[in-house]
Amino acid sequence: MAVIWCVILLGVISNIEAKPFCKFDDESSRHLECSPGDTDYVLDKGLVSDNPRTITIRLSICKISSLSNDCFEGLPRLERLDIAHNKLRTLPLGVLDKLPKLTYFNASYNRIINLPVGLFDNTQNLIQLDLTGNHLYEINPGLIKKASILYLSKNYLQGRDIHPNVFEISDVNFLLLNENDMNGAPDNMLRTLRELLFLNLDKCSLTEVPKFITTINLDTVTHLTMADNKIVAINEPIFDNLKDLEVLNLTMNLLDSLNDNLFTSLKKLKKIDLSMNRLKVITEHQFQNTPVLSDVNLSYNFITILPVNAFRASALSNLDISNNRLTYLQDNFCLELKNSGAALRDFNFSKNPWQCACLRELLREVKTMNLKYDDVNYDGSRPVCVSAGQFVCKRQVYDNQVFLDMYDLIH
Ligand SMILES: *[C@@H]1O[C@H](CO)[C@@H](O)[C@H](O)[C@H]1NC(C)=O
Ligand SMILES: *[C@@H]1O[C@H](CO)[C@@H](O)[C@H](O)[C@H]1NC(C)=O
Ligand SMILES: *[C@@H]1O[C@H](CO)[C@@H](O)[C@H](O)[C@H]1NC(C)=O
Ligand SMILES: *[C@@H]1O[C@H](CO)[C@@H](O)[C@H](O)[C@H]1NC(C)=O
């Protein structure tokens, strides 16, 4: 059967090269893979349709410019359909209606502007829907009925134009909205999601943490990432409803101030990435009473003050404070950390304008306590600290500037 199929297809291909060339990857005719023809192609009924055995169709990178609404008919067992990297501007209503088993639909990297309401009405088993990298400027409310993993990354969505009922689907676990402009999105936009675990808002041009992450139903979210935005400050304890949050990523923002109790309600928080911001001071309470918080990344900030109390009653194990403006840490920093409940193992403190006397004490401590630290930087081969006259560690904020100036001179 498969052999006959191939012969027929080969015959067709040699006459009309515009058609993609499709062949089954096995004897059982279950997995169909297509490669492009020479020119753009309108996918009609016939090329991939009408095979009761097909389970997978791969039509990615096939120069397909549009679909007829019956091109996927007669595929009662189809579970996975991949039409990524084509030239589609929309998908016709009805095109997915005869695919009752469809669980995976990948239409990423096309030129889809919008999609008709009703398109997904009959795909009741859809699990993964990937619409990444299209030109979607709106999502009609009621369009997406069911999907556990929903990729809407890299589209032209504008928060201020988004309808508050856009996500009336309760079962989404993974929602990726990164690389859209999410400023001004409705405050209650996510209120119907009951099982959200992972929310990606990277590169969304955000200037503040959006209110839509504060609705009480979001107490299921475990991962929230807002990397590479323009958030300047977080002055309210805005994460308080995210009771299950384990990983919070705020790297590459413009943060210079954080509410003192920002993380206090996050009793399941394990990792926080605050690297590449503009923080200058970490307050005494900042990470206190976060009982499972083990990874804190504060690298690439302008921190001059880092009290050991900030980590009291946390589970700190991996601390990165490299590339900051620290000239000293308080006496017995690591020991104090340990006494306050933390279990520090990895400690990266390189690339700070350390006073040599303070650095020496710190190195002695990390060695005694057997911590992993960035020892390549302290092998004596490059200047890593500054010293002014007497070799004592001066632990006063007002002494800092002298050492900062000296460090800047040699770097
Ligand atoms: C969809 O296709 C793109 C392009 O081939 C691929 O990078 C992406 O991983 C696919 N999405 C899923 C959910 O598999
Ligand atoms: C935070 O996001 C950045 C950018 O996507 C990534 O490189 C980094 O690994 C993330 N941090 C954590 C702790 O996951
Ligand atoms: C901390 O963040 C910086 C910059 O984002 C990254 O290069 C570094 O690997 C991170 N540190 C750890 C321990 O993950
Ligand atoms: C420590 O931080 C510096 C600067 O951010 C980085 O170059 C180095 O790889 C880090 N070391 C380790 C062991 O992670």
Image: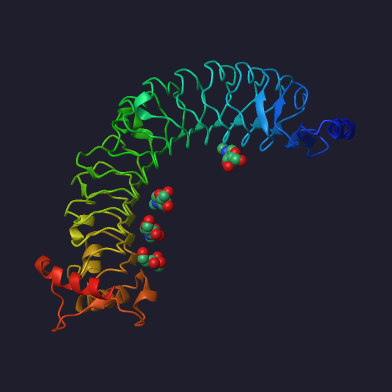
The answer to whether residue 191 is seen in the rendering is: no
Residue 68 figure quarter: top right
Q: Quadrant of the N terminus?
A: top right
The residue lying at 29 percent from left, 39 percent from top is: 207
Q: Position of residue 388 (x, y in %)?
A: 16, 80
- The front one of 299 and 179 is 179
The residue lying at 19 percent from left, 44 percent from top is: 259
Q: Position of residue 334 (x, y in %)?
A: 25, 67
Residue 27 figure quarter: top right
Q: Quadrant of the C terminus?
A: bottom left
Residue 376 figure quarter: bottom left
Q: Position of residue 144 (x, y in %)?
A: 50, 22
- The front one of 248 and 152 is 152
- The front one of 261 and 111 is 111
287 vs 228, left or right, is: left
- The front one of 410 and 302 is 410
The residue lying at 11 percent from left, 70 percent from top is: 399
Relative to 271, does residue 110 appear above or below in the rendering? above
